[in-house]
Image (spheres, rainbow, N blue to C red):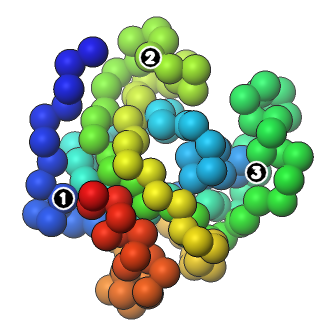
């Protein structure tokens, strides 16, 4: 598989993405590195992974979700920082986490926060306020994700 082009992480804005549970926990604490979306994005760079308040109703039927459903998981909180380094159209099967959705967003350098940081989310890719980004817990994870 070809390597993605280098991303200048300090040049791109930090954005956030709200993800239903248990998928946010699968990204933060597991091996989920593809986020399935119905829309593409041109954003490349740091992204906060925000665990939404909603539970995906189809998660109980998904074998990969079962380990995350068996333990408590945060809701309404930032749980990780990742690098969004690619977005491609559904190609059939790129990882175990690839769903039958039009777009697969590729995540790398995932750094879970030491503890969930409660914060309201939003739909789509959203711009986190400076006050959130300055939180020491989050600042440390952002620095670690930058590598």
Instruction: Give the residue at the far right of this rendering.
Output: 70
For the C terminus, the quadrant is bottom left
The residue singled out by tag 1 in the image is: 9
- Label 3 – label 2 distance at C-alpha: 25 Å
Q: Residues within 10 Å of mark 1 (few under 14, many from 20)?
A: some
Q: Is residue 47 left or right of residue 29?
A: left
If the image is split into quadrants, where does the N terminus sit? Answer: top left
Look at mark 3 in the image and give the residue it sits on.
55
* Residue at x-position 15% and y-position 65%: 10
Q: Secondary structure at mark 1?
A: loop
Give 24 or 2, whichever is nearer the viewer.
Answer: 2
**Residue 73 in the figure: left or right of residue 139:** right
| Residue at 54% over, 60% down | 112
Q: Is residue 97 left or right of residue 6?
A: right
User: Does the residue at mark 1 contact the one at mark 3 (Cβ under 8 Å)?
Assistant: no
Mark toward the start of the polypeptide (3 vs 2): 3
Q: Which residue is mark 2?
A: 94
Q: Is residue 14 left or right of residue 47?
A: left
Q: Which residue is at 62% across, 79% downward?
A: 118
Residue 69 x/y as whole percent: 83, 45
Q: Which mark lies nearer to you, 1 or 3?
A: 1
Residue 62 against residue 25 in the figure, above or below? above
The residues bearing labels 1 and 3 have C-alpha atoms spaced at a distance of 31 Å
Quick one: label 1 or label 3, which is nearer the N terminus? 1
């Amino acid at each position: 598989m070809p390597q993605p082009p280098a991303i200048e992480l300090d040049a791109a804005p930090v954005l956030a993405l709200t993800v239903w549970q248990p998928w946010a926990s699968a990204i933060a604490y597991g091996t989920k590195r593809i986020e399935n979306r119905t829309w593409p994005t041109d954003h490349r760079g740091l992204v906060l992974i925000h665990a939404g308040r909603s539970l995906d109703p189809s998660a109980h039927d998904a074998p990969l979700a079962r380990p995350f459903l068996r333990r408590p998981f945060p809701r309404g909180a930032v749980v990780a920082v990742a690098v969004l380094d690619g977005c491609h159209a559904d190609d059939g099967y790129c990882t175990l986490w690839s769903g039958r959705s039009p777009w697969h967003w590729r995540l790398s350098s995932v750094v879970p926060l030491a503890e969930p940081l409660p914060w309201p989310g939003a739909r789509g890719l959203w711009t986190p306020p400076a006050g959130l980004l300055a939180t020491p817990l989050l600042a440390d994870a952002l620095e670690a994700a930058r590598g």
